[in-house]
Amino acid sequence: MNKYDVLIVGAGPAGLFTAIMCAEKKQRIAILEKNKSCGRKLLMAGAGKCNITQAGDIHHFLECYGPNAKFLKHALLSFQNEDLLAFFRKRGLEFMTTEKGKIFPKSQKSMDVLQVLLKECHKRHIDIITETAVQSIEKVDDLFTVKTNQVSYEAQKVVIATGGLSYPHTGSTGDGQVIAKSFGHKIIPMKPALTPLKIKNYELVDMSGTSFEDLSYTLWRGGKKIGAYHGDFLLTHTGVSGPGIINHSRYMQAGDVIKCNFVGAESIEAFRSQLTKKLAAGGKTLVKTIVRDLNLTKRFADKVLELCHISDDLKCAEISKVTRQKLLTILTEYEMEVKELGGYHVAMVTTGGVSIKEIKSKTMESKKVENLYFVGEVLDIDGDTGGYNIQAAFSMGYIASLAINA
């Protein structure tokens, strides 16, 4: 039987960093990874460039993790974005910050981030055992027995850092949630998050690639408004994407309707009133001239005219009430019904997972099983796009290691 003080399941950023920090105290540590190599999802982060965290005040981060953000407060304040950068800078990795505050290694290579973590594990004599899939974990008295497809292991403390269900080809297949359930933990139903939307009966296929800066939209379910959001917005060949959609996809489901304010009107009623008066006073002015003067690209303005069946020669004096109403609606509350969220193969993270109500937020230890810890995306925590999820993984790993080392 292979015996360790600490066994960590999963060699992503949360698992690797937890191991590194646990090694501050002299103890025997191993990471079990079912893939042939470590950090496969990390290598995909930021399109392979690794958007590792976000610049700015760490308190702002607490607005970027949806309804469960409060759970992360202690972790984020204990190990902040500057702490994370300092860890890597001390080991020779420098960073760059984009205009929107995203932080990447200067090399723009995820592999450079992973290599720092792997070198540190080697330096600290941490065993990384690959191609080893955990099949079950049991606890008898104070000792965990971890059975794998290779051999069995024993440990006094176990950390589950297996991720969610996103990008399953990287090995994220829900293994940790199965383990948690076997110990009596509640699993919040999982679904893709940070994902684009596919739209039912999509009318804007030929507008693919058109973007809107900080577009406002509302979210409706069963005829009731359930949310109002804004952000950069991108039309694709099957639906909508961009940070303004991706960051709020955790709140959406098939059948929901989003109503888009394409003209960026601060007051939809005021905009409608002004445009109605302009059309009424337009006389022989062409309707297309009025529409093209709005805050839209010519290409999109012409698409709006097409959707309203407004001909090139239609004059303001000739527009019917029905057509005018349709024009106003498309411009300010264009409806798109969600056909489906992008699947796990395109979703950056998973919403749902091990219920945080059964995890101690200051240590990441299970409230049900002593010396069993959960870190990273295996938990019901998901952040916005922009480095927030990687930061959370490191911060959770840090406070878990403090508790393990205490």
Image (cartoon, rainbow, N blue to C red):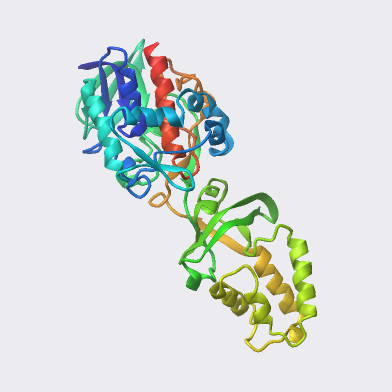
Rendered residue at 71%/57% (across/down): 266
- Residue 38, given in percent of the width and then of the height, sits at 26, 36
* Number of marks drawn: 0
- Residue placed at 55% from the left, 52% from the top? 244
Q: Is residue 392 left or right of residue 61?
A: left
Is 127 situated left or right of 229 in this image?
Answer: left
Q: Which quarter of the figure is the C terminus placed in?
A: top left
Q: Position of residue 305 (x, y in %)?
A: 62, 78
On screen, residue 339 above or below 22: below
Q: Where's residue 344, x and y in %?
A: 41, 49
Q: Nearer the viewer, residue 278 or 204?
A: 278
Instruction: Indicate the quadrant where residue 267 lies.
Output: bottom right
Is residue 59 or residue 255 the one in the foreground?
59
Q: Is residue 300 above or below residue 285?
A: above
Q: Answer above or below: position of 157 versus 249.
A: above
**229 versus 78 height, above or below:** below
Residue in the image at 35% along x and 27% along y = 87
Q: Residue at x 29, y 23 (%)?
A: 146
**Quadrant location of the N terminus in the rendered image:** top left
Left or right, 137 with reference to 393: left
Using the rendered image of the protein, determine whether residue 224 is visible from the camera's viewpoint.
Answer: yes
Is 65 placed left or right of 104 in the picture?
right
Q: Is residue 161 visible?
A: no
Q: Position of residue 29 (x, y in %)?
A: 27, 19
